[in-house]
């Protein structure tokens, strides 16, 4: 091993010094407010030189530690910059009058108080919960039935699986517009007025599209669960004289209880975060004659879209951020419940 | 008797399956069929083949592809570059980090990093998106490396957001790789980084496939993150952002909108036809492990 060769020592030293120097220079340029366009390149070169210098650092004893640091750095750095720092700032901003660029004063829980007196926001929360519950039940029910269909000795089941899964490949924005066409130009021949016009039917339309998109995916997970039920257990049930429905309800379903847990929470969190289809299909429109004494114009606007519109369209960043923090808290609670349930199941098994 | 009953049952089930398949695939049929028509024929008879002609498809495609709001080739190129580079970097950096974490899993710092990654998986994008834009803008201005409206900036963000799930799945796999392998290599004089790249990384290929499919489905179809970081009218647009920008400017122009939808769908369908099994298995494994 040439870990202590003179040339390597020299190279490492030169790179470390050059890297540190260019880092310092670029930081000085940053803090002095110089607009020099090369300062960004200098910073990146400095960091890279430091990493390479560190890698070549002539040591046998600590080489493994250096490698660990270099290997962890890229992912941890991007993660901290894109997730941890914005999360901390976001929670902080929700207590200020932040405009998306700056803030001038702390408002305490002002934003939180404001959002709970806004009928539109309360309506969005209610709609989201209704949507989540209906979807959780329907998607799982339909997906499970599809899984039974596909595992029941049906001919060409490979084709059916792929076909049912296909909508899941397409992003919600494109899907939303395709279905907007279906509701406004095709189904209108049956329904007279488009389903998307009235709030109630428009919510129903979002549910239909969501099931269409998601059931195929959940079906795949149920199929995996069903095919993992051991053959000898099923044979034993058959020998004991169990009929098809007894086998299903008393053998198969209890044996794939953990699959039900996975699918339930998967549909729950994804329905809760629903944004793309909501935006493209209805854009949140739909009138509500009277809710908490007010006339609402965004009847189909769910929580995620409400947050987006509050900040981006209405330019109220602090309020939108406070709503987002609430959104986060609700999701965190759901996840904690999920972990609880999964853990208690594991103990039982 | 029993055989006959079973056969009728199988026929009925297959018929039900076909009916559902028709329902599921029907919107796709509408998109394809109506891309061959002019607006008037689409509105008059959206389901039938009446008025469909190949030359009209060419006309529609020409109108959409060269549209200044859609810019199909540019959007496709941006989407491909962003997705491919993000996936490659996530696989590499994710495997590196997961290896370090799983080989130090008895130390406090590695456990702490791992726990933070896991906990961060519940963070919804909405709670970080607004400060993310301001952080990217401020940091970019400060150090002189533009992060907003640039492709490196959004790739950076995808590495940060996809990191947690990638590390979670890869760590679970690496824990199962026997440590003896690495010790043997180390005794033979192999450096730690050599051990990782020559022995561990190749072993990871099946699980990297899973991670890449999961991240790929998400990054390719993602709308919110590129719309915030690249902007709806920015220099670069991914396909979902381009579709949104395009539809916003052509309300009810179904000949153009459906042709745009067709163009946006095709790449994913082609990929699915090639790697159908891997994609479906990857999605299942990701759900069961995640």
Image (cartoon, coloured by chain):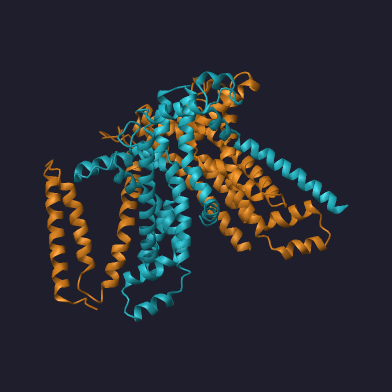
Residue A95 is drawn in which quadrant? top left
Judge left or right: residue B43 versus residue B131. right
* Number of disc labels: 0
Name which residue lies at 62% across and 48% down: A161
At x 66%, y 55%, the residue is A226
Of residue B4 and residue A240, the one placed in the foreground of this image is B4
* The one of B52 and A234 positioned closer to us in this rendering: B52
Whether residue A104 sits left or right of residue A238 in the image: it is left
Q: Residue at x 42, y 45 (%)?
A: B219
In the figure, B58 relative to A74: above or below?
Answer: above
State which chain is coloured cyan.
B
Compared across the picture, whether A230 is left or right of B109 comes to right
Which residue occupies the extreme right position in the image? Answer: B1
* Rendered view: B120 above or below B100: above
Residue B234: image quadrant is: top left
Tell me residue B170's x, y (percent).
44, 61
Residue B69 vs B13, above or below: the answer is above
Residue B125 position in % (x across, y down): 41, 43
Task: Output the letter for the chain in orange.
Answer: A
Q: In x, y percent, where is residue B263? A: 46, 35
Q: Farthest bottom residue? A: B187
The reply to whether residue A335 is visible in this rendering is yes
Residue at 79% across, 53% down: A244
Q: Look at the image and tell me whether residue A119 can be seen.
A: no
Of residues A318 and B273, the one nearer the viewer is B273
Figure check: A268 above or below B39: below
């Amino acid at each position: 091993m040439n870990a202590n060769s003179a040339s390597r020592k020299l190279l490492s030293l030169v790179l470390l010094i050059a890297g540190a120097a260019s880092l310092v220079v670029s930081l000085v340029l940053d803090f002095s407010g110089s607009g020099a366009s090369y300062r960004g390149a200098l910073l990146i070169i400095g960091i890279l030189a430091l990493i390479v210098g560190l890698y070549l650092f002539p040591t046998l004893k600590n080489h493994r530690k250096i490698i660990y640091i270099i290997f962890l750095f890229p992912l941890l750095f991007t993660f901290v910059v894109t997730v941890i720092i914005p999360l901390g700032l976001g929670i902080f901003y929700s207590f200020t009058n932040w405009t998306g660029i700056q803030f001038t004063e702390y408002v305490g829980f002002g934003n939180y108080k404001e959002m709970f007196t806004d009928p539109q926001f309360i309506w969005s929360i209610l709609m989201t919960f209704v949507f989540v519950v209906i979807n959780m039940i329907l998607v799982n029910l339909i997906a499970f039935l599809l899984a039974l269909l596909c595992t029941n000795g049906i001919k060409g089941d490979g084709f059916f699986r792929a076909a049912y899964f296909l909508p899941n490949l397409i992003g919600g924005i494109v899907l939303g517009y395709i279905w907007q066409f279906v509701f406004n130009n095709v189904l209108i021949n049956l329904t007279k007025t488009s389903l998307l016009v009235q709030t109630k039917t428009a919510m129903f339309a979002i549910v239909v599209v969501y099931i269409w998109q998601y059931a195929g995916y959940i079906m795949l997970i149920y199929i995996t669960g069903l095919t993992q039920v051991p053959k000898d257990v099923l044979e034993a049930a058959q020998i004991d004289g169990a009929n098809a429905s007894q086998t299903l309800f008393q053998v198969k379903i209890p044996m794939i209880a953990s699959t039900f847990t996975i699918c339930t929470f998967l549909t729950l969190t994804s329905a809760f975060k629903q944004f793309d289809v909501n935006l493209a299909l209805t854009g949140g429109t739909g009138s509500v004659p009277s809710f908490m004494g007010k006339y609402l114009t965004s009847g189909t606007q769910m929580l995620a879209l409400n947050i987006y519109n509050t900040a981006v369209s209405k330019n109220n960043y602090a309020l939108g951020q406070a709503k987002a923090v609430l959104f986060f808290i609700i999701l965190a609670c759901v996840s904690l419940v999920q972990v609880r349930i999964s853990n208690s199941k594991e103990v039982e098994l | 008797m029993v055989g006959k009953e079973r056969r009728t049952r199988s026929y009925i089930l297959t018929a039900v399956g076909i009916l559902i398949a028709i329902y599921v695939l029907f919107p796709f049929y509408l998109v394809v069929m109506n891309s061959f028509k002019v607006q008037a024929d689409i509105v008059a008879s959206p389901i039938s083949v009446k008025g469909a002609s190949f030359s009209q498809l060419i006309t529609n495609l020409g109108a959409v592809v060269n549209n200044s709001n859609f810019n199909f080739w540019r959007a496709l190129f941006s989407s491909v570059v962003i997705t491919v580079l993000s996936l490659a970097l996530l696989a590499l950096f994710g495997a590196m980090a997961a290896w370090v974490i799983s080989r130090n899993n008895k130390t406090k710092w590695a456990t702490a990093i791992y726990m933070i990654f896991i906990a961060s998986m519940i963070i919804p994008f909405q709670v970080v998106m607004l400060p993310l834009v301001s952080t990217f803008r401020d940091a970019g201005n400060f150090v002189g490396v533009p992060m907003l409206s640039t492709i490196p900036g959004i790739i950076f963000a995808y590495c940060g957001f996809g990191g947690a799930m990638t590390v979670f799945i890869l760590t679970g796999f690496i824990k199962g790789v026997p440590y003896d392998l690495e010790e043997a290599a180390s005794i033979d004089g192999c450096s730690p980084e050599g051990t990782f790249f020559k022995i561990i990384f190749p072993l990871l290929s099946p699980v990297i496939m899973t991670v890449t499919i999961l991240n790929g489905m998400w990054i390719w179809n993602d709308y919110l993150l590129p719309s915030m970081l690249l902007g709806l009218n920015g220099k670069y647009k991914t396909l979902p952002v381009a579709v949104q920008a395009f539809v916003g400017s052509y309300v009810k122009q179904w000949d153009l909108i459906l042709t745009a939808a067709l163009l946006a769908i095709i790449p994913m369908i082609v990929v699915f036809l090639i790697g159908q099994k891997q994609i479906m298995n990857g999605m299942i494994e990701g759900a069961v492990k995640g």
